[in-house]
Amino acid sequence: MIAYTTLGVSDFERGKHFYSTLLGLIGAECVLGNERIALFGTSLDNPMLAVCIPYNEEAASPGNGTMVAIRAGSHEACDALYAKAIELGATCDGPPGERMPGFFYGAYVLDPDGNKLCFCQMGSN
């Protein structure tokens, strides 16, 4: 159902590097883009995450209550994505751990532009 989700960034090259390196841990790469937008995923047929310079060329800003959740595949993958994001300049917004025991494991960061990400595993590991 979802084609892609877009996050605005203030520095396009920094955003591309952050998400290319981070999402590479789960097999995603830049599958489409131009000078102001890059879409990351495994193919054009699957959901993607895009980063872009806002079309109106005004400052990028995260939405209050807006978050992108990335299915990691396991608790260990959540931990690895969280650690890589922190290494790449993200800040912690909730360390890895069980949120709903036996059902939801997640880790939360704010990317360098303040966009909130969740790396999660739903169901058994």
Image (tube, helix red, strand yellow):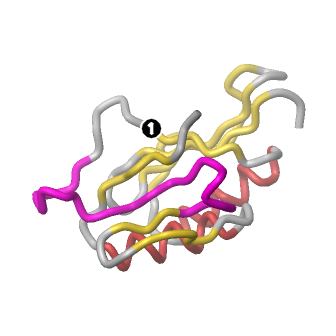
Q: How many tags in the picture?
A: 1
Query: Which span is picked out in magenta?
Result: 40-61
Where residue 110 appears, x then y in whole percent? 42, 51
* Residue 118 falls left or right of residue 90: right
Q: Residue at x 25, y 64 (%)?
A: 53
Q: Quadrant of residue 58?
A: bottom left
Q: Mark 1 points at which residue?
A: 67
| Residue 95 forms part of the magenta stretch | no
Along the line of sight, the residue nearer the viewer: 5 or 89: 5
Where residue 118 appears, x then y in whole percent? 56, 42
Q: Is the magenta stretch mostly helix, strand or loop?
A: loop
Give the quarter of the figure containing the C terminus: top right
| Residue 52 forms part of the magenta stretch | yes
- Secondary structure beneath disc 1? strand
Where residue 19 appears, x then y in whole percent? 51, 66
Give the quarter of the figure containing the N terminus: top right
Q: Which residue is drawn at 62% across and 45% down?
A: 70
Q: Which residue is drawn at 30% across and 56% down?
A: 8
* Residue 75 falls left or right of residue 114: right
* Residue 24 falls left or right of residue 57: right
Q: Name, please, the residue furthest toward the right.
A: 124
Dot 1: few (<14), some (14–19), or many (≥20) neighbours within 10 Å? some
